[in-house]
Amino acid sequence: MRIGVLAVQGDFIEHASVLRQLEAEALPVRLPQELDGLDGLIIPGGESTAISRLMLSYGLTQAIRDLARDGLPILGTCAGMILLAKRVHEPGMEPIGAMDIEVRRNAFGRQVDSFETDLAIPALGQEPFHAVFIRAPLVEGASPEVEILAKVDSGAGVAARQGKLVVSAFHPELTDDPRFHAYFLSIVGAG
Ligand code: GLN
């Protein structure tokens, strides 16, 4: 499987190494032509406003929007989740807007910018998933077509799927557990 990893800013190297561990090909994407022939795409964590600005100037925003509409499987983690959302509580940035969710950036407040917790994610099996949250966003609203894959104690969504789009507020690339990426690759493989 040929999986592109958006490599304009953020922790794309860590995603590429999980993909290689799962025997998928990981190809850095910085230009629209590097999207050609991919089976799937990952948009990593980082700073969503910076990524959004760079994507717009490289012509990637519209190209990825078109591919999402045509059914390319896309995984967005943390900033990537913000960029895939249709509605973001943050004026002045242009998300790709592919997934029918409403997202709040930096939703856990400044005091608790970062934390780790074990989450129940039934789609990954019985064993909890150790999730790393870094200045993470939250899913505040979702259309009925969106499946919430995981929630924090407050009941807010922190992972979701709509068709071939998957998002997480946490960083599955920063732990040794490859199940979240394997779940995404199973969607890629099914297509
Ligand atoms: N706080 C960042 C943003 O709003 C996301 C953080 C991350 O990707 N780890 O873009």
Image (tube, rainbow, N blue to C red):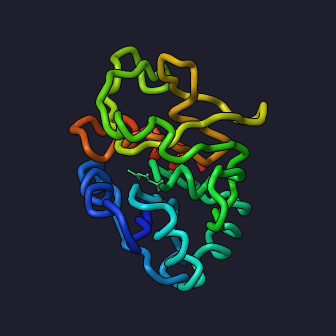
Vertically, is 30 above or below 130? below
**Which image quarter: residue 96?**
bottom right
Query: Along the horizontal axis of the image, is 187 left or right of 8?
Result: right
On the question of residue 186 being in view, the answer is: no
**Would residue 157 be seen by someone viewing this image from the given angle?**
yes
* Closest to the observer, 83 or 114: 114
Q: Nearer the viewer, residue 57 or 18?
A: 57
Left or right of residue 98: residue 49: left
Which quarter shows the N terminus?
bottom left
Residue 23, above or below 61: above
In the rendered image, residue 145, in percent from the top left (x then y), is placed at 76, 35
Residue 137 lies, with reference to residue 5, above or below; the image says above
Within the image, what quadrant is residue 119 found in? Answer: top left
Question: Based on the displayed image, in which of its 4 quarters is residue 172 positioned?
Answer: top left
Depth order, front residue of 112/87? 112
Q: Residue furthest right?
A: 144
The percent position of residue 128, horizontal first and vertical second, equals 35, 19
Q: What x and y, as percent, mark residue 131?
A: 34, 32
Residue shown at 67%/41% (left/top)? 162
